[in-house]
Image (spheres, rainbow, N blue to C red):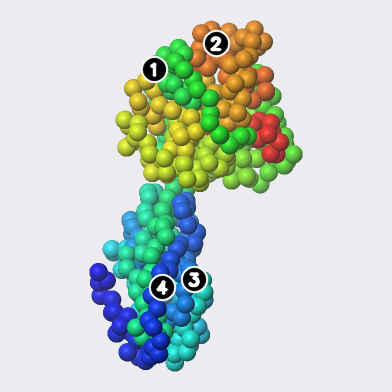
């Protein structure tokens, strides 16, 4: 299957193999990428990867073909203008045979002898090759070893290399908090609550059974807080980390009510600004963007549940960089779809949805259902499906209402509100 690649049987004509004097040995060894699993990288950034061989005995030579998507990643020279750098498997007197990249088709080809002249080869676990890529375009790609030939020292022996797992690479836009550079779609009135049950589009009624979260990671999540006229202006200014004055955006002056909160989160790497130097504090956040935020802060997007199969009718509209977070949030019943079975990934998320998610993330949903309605009231929560969530979130000082006594549950949350809510939640969990 190798194209334009010599067989290792031909490679070894340059160095005689050790003649076998005892029974032939057949080895089954694993090849694995480091890092493994899912790797995320922003457009324009570089990523270094390695391919390892595990528990091999007397390895004499290697032939590899590695495939990637050239539309998403660009292979960069690692050492001496070569696309692949030999790892510690190869000794100082190793013999290179092939080291090239087919940039058009996204194929890396490498072949080399571990040492020349021949002695003992390599035994153990070690790096075969190192490679470096630059993320050039948002999207998903898989790095896979499409062919491998592992030659043993002793003639007649055999080494079968099996790849443990392909490496998935997710390239996300540089602008925003790892989310799309395009603005979220305008308000559509479509709201779906997070956590089990769904809210019919354009309504504010209880969506039915709102089930509790199952094992959510506590203490982390973003969103919902005061706009300019909210009493929530008290939004916890200042923090134990201090205000990172070095972070400035052209549209977020130190006088802005959420300046400190935004700076804290930027410094922690949870949110970012845009390439033009702005933060766009008043811009809304979509449901899929929100899923990425809570995934990043609660750290559940890196778990196996991020591969949970999505059955939403509009699952194909969820962009690649958001799918792991949406999948994890769906599995944990933190975010779900509407009555029609849609997730509405580009619809702006509402303040009510966010309040519910915050409560689920700190495992307080049972407490919300037991809350006495008369404890804290907003003028516009009568018969609203998220009433208990909002009241408990207010009681825990995670959300605030407006000066007129309303909460505006169907209102869309801005990026500034998200930042303020994140900081409040992190403080509640004593993480800052």
The image quarter in which residue 104 lies: bottom left
The answer to whether 303 appears left or right of 248 in the picture is: left
Q: Nearer the viewer, residue 149 or 128?
A: 149
Residue appearing at x 46%, y 34% in the figure: 331
Q: Which mark is residue 147?
A: none
Label located before the other in sequence (4 or 3): 4
Asked if residue 157 is positioned above or below residue 345 in the image, the reply reads below
Residues at marks 1 and 2 touching, judged by CB atoms closer than 8 Å: no
Q: Which mark is residue 27?
A: 4
Residue appearing at x 36%, y 61% in the figure: 144
Q: Quadrant of the N terminus?
A: bottom left
| Badge 2 element | loop
Label located before the other in sequence (1 or 3): 3
Residue 309 in sight from this viewpoint: yes
How far apart in space, not on screen, are marks 1 and 3 (Cα)? 56 Å
How far apart in space, not on screen, are marks 2 and 4 (Cα)? 67 Å
The answer to whether 78 appears left or right of 381 in the picture is: left
Q: Nearer the viewer, residue 350 or 364?
A: 364
| Spot occupied by residue 359 in the image (x, y as percentages of width and height) | 59, 25
The answer to whether 424 appears left or right of 301 in the picture is: right
Asked if residue 185 is positioned above or below residue 131 in the image, the reply reads above
How far apart in space, not on screen, are marks 2 and 3 (Cα)? 62 Å
Residue to which mark 2 is pinned = 381
| Badge 1 element | loop
Mark 2 Cα shell of 10 Å, populated few (<14), some (14-19), many (≥20) = some
Residue to which mark 3 is pinned = 55
Q: Nearer the viewer, residue 186 or 170?
A: 170
| Spot occupied by residue 172 in the image (x, y as percentages of width and height) | 44, 47
Residue to which mark 1 is pinned = 200
Label located before the other in sequence (2 or 4): 4
The image quarter in which residue 343 lies: top left
Mark 4 Cα shell of 10 Å, populated few (<14), some (14-19), many (≥20) = some
């Amino acid at each position: 299957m190798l194209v334009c690649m010599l067989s290792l049987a031909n490679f070894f004509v340059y160095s005689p193999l050790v003649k076998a004097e005892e029974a032939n040995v057949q080895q089954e060894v694993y090849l694995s990428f480091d890092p493994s699993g899912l790797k995320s990288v922003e457009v324009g950034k570089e990523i270094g990867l390695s391919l390892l061989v595990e528990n091999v005995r007397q390895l004499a030579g290697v032939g590899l073909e590695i495939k990637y998507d050239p539309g998403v990643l660009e292979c960069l020279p690692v050492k001496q203008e070569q696309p692949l750098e030999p790892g510690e498997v190869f000794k100082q007197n190793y013999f290179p045979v092939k080291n090239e990249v087919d940039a058009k088709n996204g194929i890396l080809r490498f072949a080399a002898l571990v040492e020349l002249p021949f002695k003992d080869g390599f035994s153990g676990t070690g790096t075969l090759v190192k490679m470096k890529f630059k993320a050039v375009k948002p999207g998903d790609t898989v790095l896979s070893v499409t062919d491998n030939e592992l030659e043993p020292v002793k003639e007649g022996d055999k080494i079968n290399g099996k790849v443990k797992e392909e490496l998935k690479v997710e390239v996300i836009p540089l602008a925003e908090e790892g989310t799309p550079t395009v603005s979220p779609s305008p308000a559509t009135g479509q709201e779906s609550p997070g956590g089990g049950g769904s809210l019919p589009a354009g309504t504010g009624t209880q969506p039915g059974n709102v089930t509790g979260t199952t094992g959510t990671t506590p203490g982390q999540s973003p969103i919902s807080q005061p706009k300019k006229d909210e009493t929530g202006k008290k939004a916890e200014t200042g923090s134990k980390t201090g205000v990172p004055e070095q972070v400035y955006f052209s549209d977020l002056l130190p006088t802005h009510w959420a300046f400190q909160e935004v700076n804290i989160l930027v410094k922690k790497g949870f949110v970012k600004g845009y390439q033009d130097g702005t933060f766009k504090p008043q811009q809304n956040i979509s449901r899929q963007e929100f899923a990425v935020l809570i995934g990043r802060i609660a750290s559940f997007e890196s778990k196996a549940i991020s591969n949970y199969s999505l059955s939403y009718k509009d699952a194909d509209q969820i962009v690649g960089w958001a799918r792991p977070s949406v999948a994890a949030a769906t599995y944990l019943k933190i975010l779900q779809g509407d009555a029609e079975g849609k997730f509405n990934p580009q619809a702006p998320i509402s303040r009510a949805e966010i309040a519910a998610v915050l409560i689920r993330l700190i495992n307080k949903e049972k407490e919300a259902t037991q809350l006495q309605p008369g404890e804290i009231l907003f003028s516009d929560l009568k018969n609203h499906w998220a009433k208990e969530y909002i009241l408990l979130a207010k009681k825990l000082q995670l959300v605030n209402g407006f000066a007129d006594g309303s909460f505006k549950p169907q209102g869309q949350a801005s990026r500034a509100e998200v930042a303020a809510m994140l900081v409040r939640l992190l403080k509640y969990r004593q993480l800052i």
